[in-house]
Image (cartoon, rainbow, N blue to C red):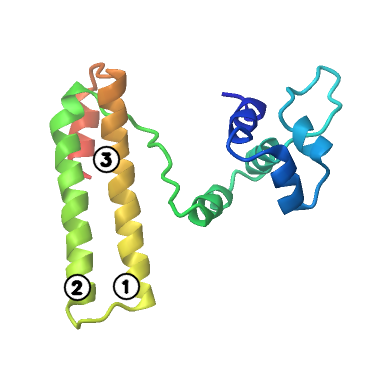
């Protein structure tokens, strides 16, 4: 879906007039955001395209993480290495290992009945890693991308 199409759908729930009032922008500006960019490169770039351009320019995922946090969620990047058939058992083992490591971090942090900021940061890092590994496995399942892996790669992954 293109950004202008998404904004058009969003504006079905809250009108451009209401949004223009909230953002202190003209209603015509808000309506322009719902128009596809023209071929001449003129027109008004909508905020979604600008955020995307900023991310593409910097490559800094903290921008996306910040937006997700503002929306009450978290950004989880898709893994670069998608599991394959020879990797299925090691993949499930890796998910279980990541979960066990998360539980270990949580148990150590909670042992004294309080959790420090540093411990909370460690818990968050383990949680994000678990979600990323699990997401890679689920994507593999959904896409049916189970081409054969070289035995050396499966062995390396299983020992990581």
At x 70% / y 45%, what residue is drawn? 19
Q: Nearer the viewer, residue 61 or 10?
A: 10
Q: Is residue 73 left or right of residue 156?
A: right
The mark tally for this picture is 3
Say which quarter of the image contains residue 31. Answer: top right
Badge 3: how crowded within 10 Å, few (<14), some, or many (20+)?
Answer: many
Look at mark 2 in the image and give the residue it sits on: 108
Q: Earlier in the sequence, mark 1 or mark 2?
A: 2
Q: Tag 2's secondary structure?
A: helix
Q: Which residue is mark 3?
A: 134
Q: Give SS at disc 1.
A: helix
Q: Residues within 10 Å of mark 1 (few under 14, many from 20)?
A: some
Q: Quadrant of the N terminus?
A: top right
Tell me if residue 118 comes above or below residue 82 in the rendering. Answer: below
Left or right: where 70 falls relative to 87? right
Locate residue 139: give its quadrant.
Answer: top left
Q: Residue at x 35, y 32 (%)?
A: 81
Disc 2: CA contacts within 10 A as few (<14), some (14-19) or many (>=20): few
> Residue, x 15% and y 46% (percent of image)?
96
* Distance between mark 3 and mark 2 Cα atoms: 23 Å
Q: Position of residue 115 (x, y in %)?
A: 29, 77
Nearest the viewer among 13 and 109 is 13
The answer to whether residue 81 is above or below residue 66 is: above
Q: Of marks 3 and 1, which one's residue comes earlier in the chain?
A: 1
Labels 1 and 2 touching (C-beta < 8 A): yes
Task: Decide which of 52, 149 is in the foreground and name it.
Answer: 52
Q: CA distance from mark 1 to mark 2?
A: 9 Å
Give the secondary structure at mark 3: helix
Query: x, y (%) of residue 149?
Result: 24, 22
Read off the residue under disc 1.
Answer: 119
């Amino acid at each position: 879906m293109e950004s202008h199409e998404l904004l058009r759908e969003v504006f079905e729930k809250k009108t451009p007039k209401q949004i223009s009032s909230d953002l202190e922008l003209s209603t015509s500006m808000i309506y322009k955001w719902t128009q596809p960019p023209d071929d001449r490169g003129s027109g008004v770039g909508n905020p979604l395209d600008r955020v995307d351009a900023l991310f593409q320019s910097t490559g800094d995922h903290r921008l996306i993480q910040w937006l997700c946090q503002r929306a009450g969620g978290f950004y989880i990047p898709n893994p670069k290495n998608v599991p394959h058939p020879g990797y299925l058992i090691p993949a499930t083992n890796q998910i279980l290992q990541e979960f066990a490591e998360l539980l270990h971090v949580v148990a150590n942090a909670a042992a004294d009945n309080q959790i420090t900021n540093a411990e909370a940061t460690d818990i968050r890092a383990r949680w994000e890693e678990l979600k990323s590994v699990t997401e890679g496995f689920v994507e593999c399942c959904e896409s049916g991308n189970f081409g054969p892996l070289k035995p050396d790669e499966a062995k390396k992954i299983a020992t990581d």
